Image (cartoon, rainbow, N blue to C red):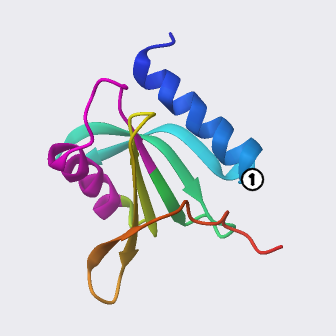
Amino acid sequence: MLTPEEWVRQHWIYFLVEKNQYPKGLLVSERGLIYNKLQKRTDILVRNQEGAPYLLVECKAPNVPINQKTVDQAVLYHFKLKSNFLILSNGFSHIFLKYDFSKNQFLQEKNLPKAPFSH
């Protein structure tokens, strides 16, 4: 069913694959994971060529603000998966974050990370 959140998710998949040359085979949509004994799901997970988590995209409906609560939820998923990048989006507002493993913190980025392969 095309819920508002699904609309955002489908647009991100199109944007990553068609507009930014992310390999379609490296994207996983709505992957389940267990966090604190609760079943959760990621919206979009992009793996690198070795299969490790590269980019996590957390999608919200357009009427849901991207705020600290949204960031906190996505960060929980990040710490379970250990992705290099994290994007939060409601389709209109987007936050791009890069995880600095050496400093154990996120740094805000201005742009979408490059696709996980070299040309």
Left or right, 87 with reference to 79:
right
- Please, is residue 91 above or below residue 7 in the view? below
Query: What residue lies at 48% left-to-right and 23% top-to-bottom?
Result: 6
- Please, is residue 44 above or below residue 7 in the view? below
The x, y position of residue 75, in whole percent, is 26, 57
Q: Count the marks.
A: 1
Disc 1 marks a residue whose amino acid type is Pro
Magenta stretch contains residue 66: yes
Left or right, 107 with reference to 50:
left
Find numbered disc 1 in the image and state the secondary structure of the residue it sits on.
loop
Task: Give the image quarter of residue 86.
Answer: bottom left
The x, y position of residue 83, in whole percent, is 44, 65
Query: What residue lies at 16% left-to-right and 50% top-to-bottom?
Result: 68
The x, y position of residue 102, in whole percent, is 33, 89
* The C terminus: image quadrant: bottom right
Query: What residue lies at 27% left-to-right and 42% top-to-bottom?
Result: 66
* Front residue of this view, candidates 23 and 109: 109
Magenta stretch contains residue 24: no
Which residue is identified by label 1? 23
Report the span colored magenta: 57-80
The x, y position of residue 43, in whole percent, is 44, 38
Task: Give the image quarter of residue 37.
Answer: top left
Other-residue count near label 1 (Cα within 10 Å), few / some / many at <14 / 14–19 / ≥20: some
Task: Give the image quarter of residue 4.
Answer: top left
- Please, is residue 47 above or below residue 58 in the view? below
User: Residue placed farthest to the right in the image?
Assistant: 119
User: Residue placed farthest to the bottom in the image?
Assistant: 102
Query: What residue lies at 45% left-to-right and 53% top-to-bottom?
Result: 56
Left or right, 61 with reference to 119:
left
